[in-house]
Image: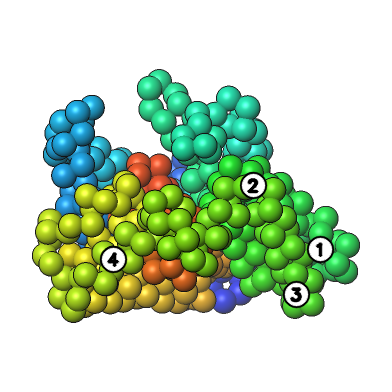
Amino acid sequence: MADYKKKDGNVYQLNRKRYDDIPDRSRLNLRNLINPHPFRGIDYTVLILVLILVMFGLVMVFSSSYYYAMTEPKFNDKFYFFARQLRWSIVGLVAMIMCMSVNTEFFRRVSGIAYIFIIGILGVVLVVGVATKGSQRWLEVLGTSFQPSEFAKFIMIIFMSDYVIKNKNKLNGNFKSFLIFSIPLLLTFILIAKENLSTGIVVMAVGFMIMFVASNRVGNFVVFGMLGVLGFILLVIVEPYRMDRIKGWLDPWSDPSDTGYQVIQSLFAVASGGLFGLGIGQSRQKTFIPESYNDIIFAIICEELGLVGAIVVILLFALLIWRGTKIAMTAKDKYSSYMATGITTMIAVQVIINISVVTNSIPNTGMPMPFISYGGTSLVVMMASMGLLLNISRDCK
């Protein structure tokens, strides 16, 4: 039998080399696997913010897509995208409640298997994945398409949070040891970035932040960051379309009908919104911007709701990120804290990239705005992540 001691209100297992700094939860069983009261004691501010953003997203998806869905012969239904997003919102709500209900120890125990599984799936995508607009990112199962790279975000959060605790000596060792430690993260990044650089950047940022919070060797991260910049440049150079996007970013008017087209139209949308916007459903640029309901939806928000509406949306995300940071800082144990750190980083990075693309602050890249952009896989993963964050918030100190 293992020996236990009580400290700071938590039970710790003695003589346990790999998990000596997190509470012992070895008695996970069917009785404590599911919390029968998932809404009890959670951070209701986070819950309300998520629900507001999801409902607002449904409104904006309809507002930005109804004209295209109504005039496109293959759809011929102005509610086409709204109805699909509503269905995925319901699936996401179920996923959120499930992640709120399951004991966080369950995520730790399945994290290794989940990592191996997602690595295999990402490899399958590169071989037999469905190509869309030149990028092979999708898998189709029973008539439903999804992006495995979106699920990789969630899985890397639960995996890296466990991995940094189990391998803390390598994380805090010399740079060679640090690089060996980083192999699982680098492997995931390479498999994703081959066809989806923006999502690869999010996964890398999430893993990097979890490692940084868990480590006490800043020097390793400086060198790792410099190598990361060189790797990023290499990834841009080897794909001609990425170089075209950079040229379109630096001078959109050099090719206004191709590489600079979306940038120019999104800037027109942002500028024409003024202070209070043209009103919901009154956007003109949605008739020019390809798939305005998708990654570029923030431009439509600016046009229809103006500067005031855009600031309100940014403030909602800022408040959500602040609450996530607070949860990470007050979580009951390190594993929970690292997961909350990863979830908050994922939200922050995606919001920053999405808004930066719309305002032409960085080169154009596909990055959905969390909870708002059209897309089933992204929405379900985001809401599941919020469910896990709410789960962690229940036991904050």
Mark 2: amino acid? Glu
Which residue lies at the image location 19% right of the left edge and 76% below the top edge? 274
Q: Is residue 392 visible?
A: no
- Viewer-side label of 3, 1: 3
In this picture, residue 206 sits left or right of residue 369: right
Which circle's residue, 3 or 4, is located before the other in the chain? 3
Badge 1 is on which residue? 178
Identify the element where label 2 is drawn. loop
From the top left corner, tell me how far across and down residue 101 is, in percent.
38, 50
Q: Residues within 10 Å of mark 4 (few under 14, many from 20)?
A: some
Which residue lies at the image location 39% right of the left edge and 69% below the top edge? 359
Mark 1: amino acid? Phe
Q: Badges 3 and 1: C-beta atoms under 8 Å apart?
A: no
Mark 3: amino acid? Val
Badge 3 is on which residue? 222
Badge 2 is on which residue? 239
Q: Compute the Cα span from label 1 to label 2.
A: 29 Å
In this picture, residue 264 sits left or right of residue 239: left
Q: Residues within 10 Å of mark 1 (few under 14, many from 20)?
A: some
Q: Compute the Cα span from label 4 to label 1.
A: 46 Å
